[in-house]
Image (tube, rainbow, N blue to C red):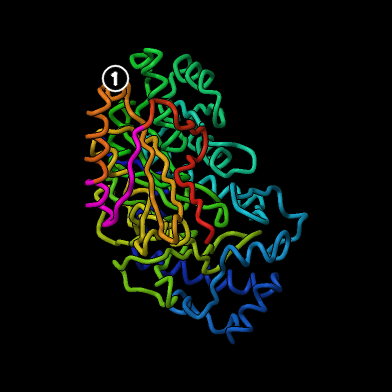
Amino acid sequence: MAERYYQKDMECASREEMVALQNERLVAQVKHVWDNVPYYRKKMEEKGVTPDDIKGIEDLHKLPFLTKDDLREAYPYGLLAKPLADCVRIQSTSGTTGKRVVAFYTQHDVDLWEDCCARAIVAAGGTNEDVCQVAYGYGLFTGGPGMNGGSHKVGCLTLPMSSGNTDRQLQFMTDLGATIICCTPSYAEYLAESIHERGLRDQIKLKAGIFGAEAWSEEMRHDIEAQLGLKAYDIYGLTETSGPGVAFECSEQTGMHINEDHFIAEIIDPDTLEVLPEGSQGELVFTSITKEAFPLLRYRTKDITVLSREKCSCGRTLVKMHKPMGRSDDMLIVKGVNVFPSQIEAVLLENGYPANYQIVVDRVNHSDTIEVLVEMTPEIFSDSLGHITEMEKELVSALKAMLGIYAKVRLVEPKSIARSEGKAVRVIDKRKI
C-alpha cells in the first residue's frame, strides 16, 4: 500500500525548503516574544541578545533556555504572548508538583496542533473510513483533545471515550467497530487483558494503535501488537509545546518524525548545555516557531534521545527522534548507577512477564535499595513456591546483567498491582533525598 500523507508538501519538503521556512519563522517568533513577553525579553537581555542577533536557525544557540521552573515562576500569565481576548483554550500538565504548567492556545494554535495530530493518524494508516477511539484523558490533559481534533481533521468517525470505564470502552469498540485506538501503552495492555478475559478477541477490528504519554519499550510494543492484532505506533508531545503530535511514528517504526515546520529540535549536553552534533545522545530541546499564545524558545524537555536524518522509507524528510530512553530528571540514580524504568521493563518482557510492575527504591542504613515487584501470570502463580523462588533468582541475574547492580525481585499475585487507566505509576522512591 502506498504511503499516505496529511500535508505532503511539509512532510516531504526538501532540507533546503525546510531550513528556509524555519529561518523565516524563527526570526518572526523571536521578535514576537521580545515585543510581547517581558519575562522572555528580560532573559534575553540577561544573555546580551536581541532579535537583531537572530538571523536564522544557525543563531538559535544564542538564545537562553527555558525550563519548567521558568514556567512555574511565570505562572499563570507571565509567558503569554497574545491578549487573553485572542486565547480560546488552556491545557495543563498532569501530575507536576507545586504550580501546574498552564499552556494557552489561540484558535490558530489549536488548528496547527490538530494538523500535527492528523499527520500522526494518517501515518498510522488512518483515513476518513476509519473509526478512531480516543481513550486518552480529556479535559486539561492534552492527549484526548489533541487526538480528537486530529481525528476530526482526517475525517475519522471519532469516539471521544476519554480514559477509564473499560466496560464502556469495550462496548463501543465492538459495537462500532473501532479500527484505531489512541491511549497510553499501559492502558492498551489493560484493554488487551480485558478483551481476552471476556472472550472478545474475534470481535475486535483494530488495525492500528497510537500510544504515547509514557515510556514504553520495543518488547511492550510487540506484546501489544500480538495481543490486539494491530500495528502499534509511537507518538510524542508535551503540553508546553502543544501536546501529542510534536513527533509521530510512520510505518517504518524506527523513530518519530518531528514536525519541523512547527518545532525546531536540538540535542544538548544536560550538564554543559552545549549543543551536540547530530547523532549524539543528549537532552532534547524544542523551539516552537508557529505557536502564537504560548511560544517557547529553547525549551528543555529533560527527555534523553538521539536525532537522525537518515533517509526514511516512508518518504518523509522530517528529522527523526529515537524513542526517549528516559528522562534526565525521571532517571533514577541508585548506588550511583543511572537506572531507567524502560530497562527493567525490557528485561521483564524478554523473560515472559507482563509489563505490570513497580520499582520501589529506598535507602536502608545509608545504602540504596531497589526492589522490583513483578506480577505473575496465572500459570506462574499456580507453580510451587520453590519454582517461584527459582524464577525470582533468574530475574535478579537478568536485571543485574542489564543494570549492573543488584535489584531484589518479588513475584506477586496476578492483578495485585493497581491497574492504570492513565499514566502508570511505575516508580515509588521512598528515599529522602
Residue drawn 78% across the image and 54% down it? 85
Magenta residue check for 112: no
Find numbered disc 1 in the image and state the secondary structure of the residue it sits on: loop
Question: Is any part of residue 163 visible from this angle?
Answer: yes
Residue sitting farthest toward the bottom: 48
Looking at the rendering, the stretch of residues picked out in magenta corresponds to: 397-411
In the image, what residue occupies the spot 30% across and 61% down? Answer: 308
Residue 261 locus on image (x, y percent): 46, 59
The residue closer to the viewer here, 298 or 310, is 298
Q: Residue at x 36, y 18 (%)?
A: 196
Q: Position of residue 145 (x, y in %)?
A: 58, 40
Check disc 1 and report the residue beneath it: 382
Image quadrant assignment for residue 82 = bottom right
Q: Residue at left 28%, top 40%?
A: 219
Could you tell me how many numbered marks the image carries?
A: 1
Q: Is residue 47 above or below residue 308?
A: below
Residue 103 in sight here: no
Where, by quadrant of the figure, is residue 382 drawn?
top left
Question: Circle 1: is it few (<14), some (14-19), or many (20+) Cα within 10 Å?
Answer: few
Instruction: Kindly identify the amino acid type of the residue bearing the numbered disc 1.
Output: Ser
Image quadrant in which the N terminus is located:
top left
